[in-house]
Amino acid sequence: MYVIIAGGGDIGYHLTKALHQHGYEVLLIEKNRKRAMDLADDLGERVMYGDACEVRVLNEAGARRADVVVAATGDDEDNLIISQLAQNFFKVKRVLAIVRDPRHEPLFFRLGIHETICSTRFIFNILEQEVEYGEVLPIGAIMRGEIEVIEAEVTPESPVAGKSIGEIELPPKTLLAAVVRNGQLTLGLANLILQPGDTVVALTPPQHEKQLARVMRGTAR
């Protein structure tokens, strides 16, 4: 898989390192010359100097063969331009965009950029919920906000502890997509027995979030 990341800030830098360590082909594009040179000292040929808002730069980066483009600059306008170029001009299969201002997310959705990551909104959601141990938290949204990405920790008191994933009666259109146990990610095992301390990642429509919380915790939110 070939991944292009636009923006050499902390997100772009750490994502590039992580993807490379996991065997991905990855290229980081940074438009500030000094920053690009500093990054190249660490990341080598995986760094390209240029403005990813320009068709020429994305073309030189090999966007036509890219599987994923991540627009991760510090500017929402730039991220929107990069995302649209990648999706509409270069026909990249998957485009992810960082959105700094939550008010800009609807614009991304209207222009066809459906996978956005807004850390401001995620942090606000967490702060608003008076987080406690075992809480069920929304950590993201996909498909124009029609599906919530939910994180839930299995506690000793949780009604799902000791049950296999296949035994759990979930709300409609809800999927337990992954389980993190002892730092290891497990995907799609219907016979996996959930244990206290497991972190479950689920996908569910927003209207079923409270119902999912009751399944995981045994009580209403």
Image (tube, rainbow, N blue to C red):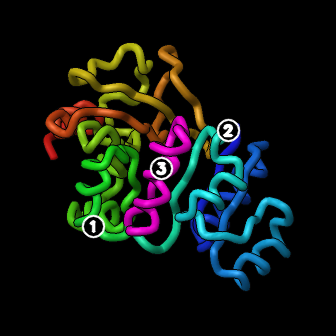
| Magenta-highlighted residues | 77-99
Disc on the earlier residue, 1 or 2: 2
Q: Nearer the viewer, mark 3 or mark 2?
A: 2
According to the image, label 2 marks what residue?
65
Q: Mark 1 touching mark 2, by CB under 8 A?
A: no
Q: Residues within 10 Å of mark 1 (few under 14, many from 20)?
A: few
* Rendered residue at 76%/65% (across/down): 47
Judged left or right of residue 173, residue 48 is: right
Q: CA distance from mark 1 to mark 2?
A: 37 Å
Q: Secondary structure at mark 3?
A: strand
In which quadrant of the rendered view does residue 212 lie?
top left
Q: Residues within 10 Å of mark 2 (few under 14, many from 20)?
A: some
In which quadrant of the rendered view does residue 200 lie?
top left
Visible residue check, residue 218: no
Disc on the earlier residue, 3 or 2: 2
Q: Secondary structure at mark 1?
A: helix
Magenta segment includes 96: yes
